[in-house]
Amino acid sequence: MQAVKEKVKDSVSAAKAKAKEKQAKAEEKAEVATARSRAERELAHERGKARVAAAKMELHQEKALHREEAIQHRLRKHHGVGHHHGGVGMAGTAPPAAGTTETTVAPPPPAGPLHHHPAPAKHYY
């Protein structure tokens, strides 16, 4: 479900970016039409390119934000649901007795992917 939400947000952002690009191009055309010299026309063209680039950059940033939100949602969704890999409350990890100088080091987390599903098989047709 989260993937669908992400795609919808991306498509809405893309539509907004396209509208901003069209608006930037229309403004560029208007500036070029009212320019009196070749230098003014070139300057209007450069401004138009900058506006289009800004719209594309904004789309890229929004998509990155959507990805981040989706990842955060997935992490919160699976947090604390039987996926404990170590830490507080594990058997055999009692604190040192009072008055001792023994220090304990927590074991490193297991390496590998965050999920427990096998990787999909690659098909070459």
Image: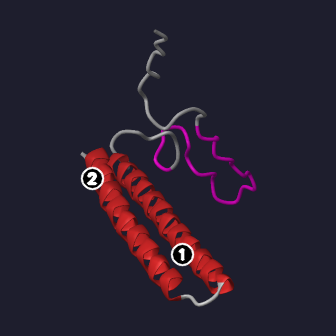
- Taking the spot 45% from the left edge, 75% from the top edge, the residue there is 24
- Front one among 72 and 1: 1
Position of residue 96 in the picture relative to residue 81 (left or right):
right
Q: Indicate the amino acid at tag 2.
A: Lys
Quadrant where the image shows the N terminus: top left
Q: Which residue is labeled 2 in the image?
A: 5
Q: Which residue is labeled 1 in the image?
A: 48
- Front one among 120 and 46: 46
Q: Which residues are magenta?
A: 88-109
Task: Determine the image quadrant of residue 22.
Answer: bottom left
Query: At which x and y percent is residue 46?
Result: 62, 75
- Taking the spot 49% from the left edge, 60% from the top edge, the residue there is 60
Query: At which x and y percent is residue 52?
Result: 51, 69
| Kind of element beneath mark 1 | helix
In the rendered view, tell whether residue 51 sits above or below residue 5. below
- Taking the spot 37% from the left edge, 59% from the top edge, the residue there is 14
Position of residue 93 in the picture relative to residue 30 (left or right):
right
In the rendered view, tell whether residue 114 sits above or below residue 79. above
